[in-house]
């Protein structure tokens, strides 16, 4: 899997009923930053660690560039925050023209609280054809610029 750090510009419970795409073989990844102890592979590839964490505060982008167009019917996302109370927003978008244009799949907010709401797991059922780029934009705290984004896992079928 080829990895590249990109600029800040916006353009484990595995389901046994899904066959997840082999992202290591099928896609390259671009990210705005990463902490060396929590690389993006830890979120994208099974059994590779405990998720990805941004290397700097603020909004972060994770972009999967598929080597060949993919048909996608399910996206599973997992987020965890057990130390800080914050409101996170993520936006999931896709492109079939190599990132020239994007269509939004979902925009969602979640309130993390160490006293109870520490995990967000989402599964989106879809019918997307010929996807060339999948983009996840995470704003870790919509009320502040000091929080670090993180992603426990991203699976695609």
Image (cartoon, helix red, strand yellow):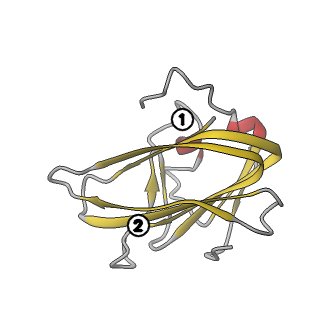
Q: Secondary structure at mark 1?
A: loop
Give how far apart the Cα atoms at labels 2 and 1 are: 23 Å
Q: Secondary structure at mark 2?
A: loop
Q: Residue at x 44, y 72 (%)?
A: 57
Res. 57 mark? none
Task: From the top left corner, tell me how far across and down residue 7 is, in percent.
Answer: 66, 74
Position of the C terminus by quadrant: top right
Is 89 positioned to the left or the right of 128 in the image?
Answer: left
Q: Residue furthest front?
A: 127
Q: Residue at x 14, y 53 (%)?
A: 115
Looking at the image, residue 11 lies above or below residue 13: below
Q: Residue at x 51, y 20 (%)?
A: 16
Count the marks. 2
- Of 75 and 129, which appears nearest the observer? 129
- Estimate how packed mark 1 is, as few (under 14), some (14 to 19) or many (20 or more) residues with alpha carbons within 10 Å: few
Task: Provide the residue designation for mark 1.
Answer: 48
Task: From the top left corner, tell me how far across and down residue 101 is, in percent.
Answer: 76, 68
Looking at the image, residue 135 lies above or below residue 68: below
Task: From the top left corner, tell me how far across and down residue 100 is, in percent.
Answer: 80, 69
Which quadrant would residue 152 be assigned to in this image? top left
Task: Provide the residue designation for mark 2.
Answer: 140
Position of the N terminus by quadrant: top right
Looking at the image, residue 78 lies above or below residue 33: above
Looking at the image, residue 36 lies above or below residue 15: below
Task: From the top left corner, tell me how far across and down residue 6 is, in percent.
Answer: 68, 68
> Is the C-beta separation of discs 2 and 1 under 8 Å?
no
- Of 73 and 99, which appears nearest the observer? 73
Q: Residue at x 23, y 64 (%)?
A: 85
């Amino acid at each position: 899997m080829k990895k590249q750090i990109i600029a800040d510009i916006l353009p484990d419970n595995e389901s046994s009923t899904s066959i997840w795409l082999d992202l290591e073989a099928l896609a390259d990844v671009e990210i705005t930053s990463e902490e060396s102890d929590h690389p993006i592979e830890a979120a994208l590839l099974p059994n590779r660690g405990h998720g990805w964490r941004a290397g700097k505060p603020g909004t972060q982008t994770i972009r999967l560039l598929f080597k060949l167009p993919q048909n996608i019917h399910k996206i599973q996302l997992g987020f965890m925050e057990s130390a800080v109370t914050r409101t996170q927003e993520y936006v999931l978008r896709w492109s079939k023209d190599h990132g020239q244009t994007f269509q939004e799949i979902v925009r969602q907010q979640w309130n993390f609280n160490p006293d109870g709401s520490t995990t967000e797991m989402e599964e989106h059922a879809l019918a997307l054809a010929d996807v060339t780029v999948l983009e996840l934009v995470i704003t870790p705290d919509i009320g502040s610029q000091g929080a670090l984004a993180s992603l426990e896992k991203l699976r695609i079928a």
